[in-house]
Each structure stands twice: as structure tokens, then as C-alpha cells.
Image: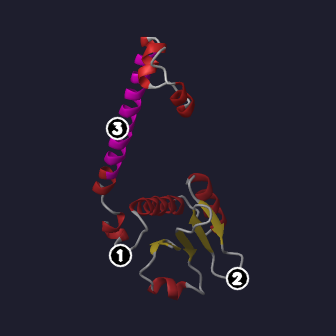
Amino acid sequence: MENFDFKKYLAEGVLTKEARAEYYPQELLDMDKEIEDLKNRLDAAIKAKNKAKGDFTKSQPSVSDEEEFSGMRFSDKKSGYQFKELVNFIKSEYAAGNKDDIKSLDQAISNELEYYTTRNNGNDGNFPSILIGPPGRTMFLVVLKTLENQDELEKSTKYIKIGNWYVRPW
């Protein structure tokens, strides 16, 4: 108790390491060391996982490299793969007989592709379309070909044609 620095104890609010050894049993000191080692191992594992994820993402080919999606620009690889999933979904819905019903396609996209929200633009006098993306952000556009917009859509190279539907990244 002679080497106990009361002023330092009050200033720091804890016992100094030298003083802790005097007052705490060795079991508690060993537990503190084990906890510190576990924290360091967890930090190292998190860093290794993040590096592996980054390396994996870099090794994945871009959807823009595929012939069907060539020339299309996506904000990142993830949105490219989401767009490919949307196109495949619309192809399956179109093949299933939902040919020109924008409301049923809108509902199907909302129900089946859980990370999308849709907003239908078909009621404001413009051509029937669906804006797709997470809340507050539009990522993709689905347009139904009509007599008014067929010339514009068929000339454009920005769209992927699926029956009477035209799909493109926003």
C-alpha cells in the first residue's frame, strides 16, 4: 500500500497496472488479457473478410460485358446484376402470359423482387411505365410500347426489348 498513488488513482479513475496486480486476483488479470486477445482476433477476422469480399467483387465480370447488356451503363456491378435479374423476371412474366398488363407486372415486381419499390407512371397522361428502385432512388425504367411511343422506343438503343416491354437502366 506504500506505493499506491492516490492522486493518480483519482485523476485516472482506475488503478495503475502495477497497482492492479497488487489488488486484483491473477484470474481477473488473465481474463482481461484473454478478452483483449479475442478483440484483436475479431478485428483481424473482420479485416480479412472485408478484403476477401473486395477481391471477390473485383473478380466478378461486369454485366455490361455480356452481349445482351453491352453498351449499358450501371452505377456499379451490383446494380448491373439487379438489372439482369429484373430483365430475366420480366421475360418469365411475359412468357407466363402477362403480356400487356402494366398493373399486374407492377404488382409482380413489387411482390417478387423484394428489394425493389415501384412507382407507376401510367396514370399521368404519359406512356405507361414503371419506375423501379429503392425508396427515393430510381434505378430502372420499364415502358410498355404504345402507338404514341413505338417509333421512339424502336429507334432507341438504350432499351432491352421484351415483347411489348422496353427496359433500361435509369
**Residue 24 in view (yes/no):** no
Q: How many marks?
A: 3
Residue at position x 43%, y 62% in the image:
84
116 in relation to 129, above or below:
above
Q: Residue furthest front?
A: 2
Residue extent of the magenta highlight: 28-54
- Between residue 78 and residue 102, name the one nearer to us: 78
- Between residue 80 and residue 89, name the one nearer to us: 80
Indicate left or right for 65 with 89 as reference.
left
State the residue position of label 3: 44
Q: CA distance from mark 2 to mark 1?
A: 30 Å
Q: CA distance from mark 3 to mark 2?
A: 57 Å
- Name the kind of residue labelled 3 in the image: Ala
Asked if the magenta segment contains residue 62, the reply would be no
As drawn, the label of residue 71 is 1
- Between residue 76 and residue 112, name the one nearer to us: 76
